[in-house]
Amino acid sequence: MKKGLLGVSIFLLLFLLSSCATIEEPPFPANLLGVIYDNYNNPVSGASITMEDGRALSSDIDGRFVLPALNKQEYKIIVSKKGFEPVDVELDFFDPKQVLYIKLSSITYFKEEIEKSLKSKDWEKADRMITRAFKIDEKDPVLLYLAAIYSLEVDKYNQCLGYLNSLGEIGYSTAAIGKLEDEVEKKRSEE
């Protein structure tokens, strides 16, 4: 009797296992949905998405894009937009349900971070943010002014004057710029 129960149990177990749905590999090629946003979590529309094979498209008004007919593999993507720092993305596409989230940093964000760094005297962060912001727009007048203030604060007087000269070359001349030039001369004379 025990042998009979054991045989029936094994039969039922095998029957149940064989009737279970098998997990199938998701279908490829598949589309990849992506979303581009900024440091304030706002969507970035009109960003250029370029794949290493030359395919290119833009993000829509909500920062969304779809990369069509991708195979299960690794991809390199470059995302860029005027006024933002470009981003290189290495993507391992393995699941059609994947969503790619990409953050772009704007020159506005960098200028705000530079101001905060100057106020808190975090010179290392200010230097890092200035370097990144100049890659976006080396002639931005606010950025040049902030870089001049930073240079003055870290005793790089020639660099400070260089930034102030650049402001003059692009047509900016204000009392604040003149005051900063006077401050450079004052600090130099104190040395």
Image: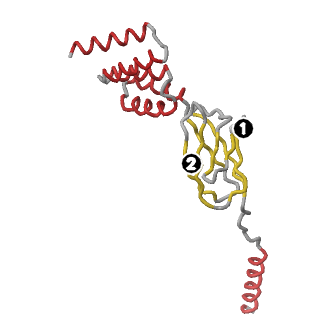
Residue 124, x across and y down, in percent: 36, 32
Does the CB distance between marks 1 and 2 fall below 8 Å?
A: no
Residue under the image location 71 percent in, 36 percent down: 62
- What residue does disc 1 label? 60
Name the element at disc 2.
Answer: strand
Which of the 4 image quadrants contains residue 189?
top left
- What residue does disc 2 label? 89
Name the element at disc 1.
Answer: loop
How is the structure coloured here? secondary structure
Residue under the image location 46 percent in, 34 percent down: 132
Q: Is residue 159 left or right of residue 87?
A: left
Q: Is residue 190 left or right of residue 177?
A: left
Judged from this view, the residue extending furthest toward the left is 191
Residue 104, x across and y down, in percent: 57, 37
Residue 19, x across and y down, in percent: 79, 76
Residue under the image location 45 percent in, 26 percent down: 114
Q: Report the quarter where the N terminus lies.
A: bottom right
How many neighbours does mark 1 have within 10 angstroms: few (below 14), some (14-19), or many (20 or more)? Answer: some
Q: Amino acid at mark 2?
A: Val
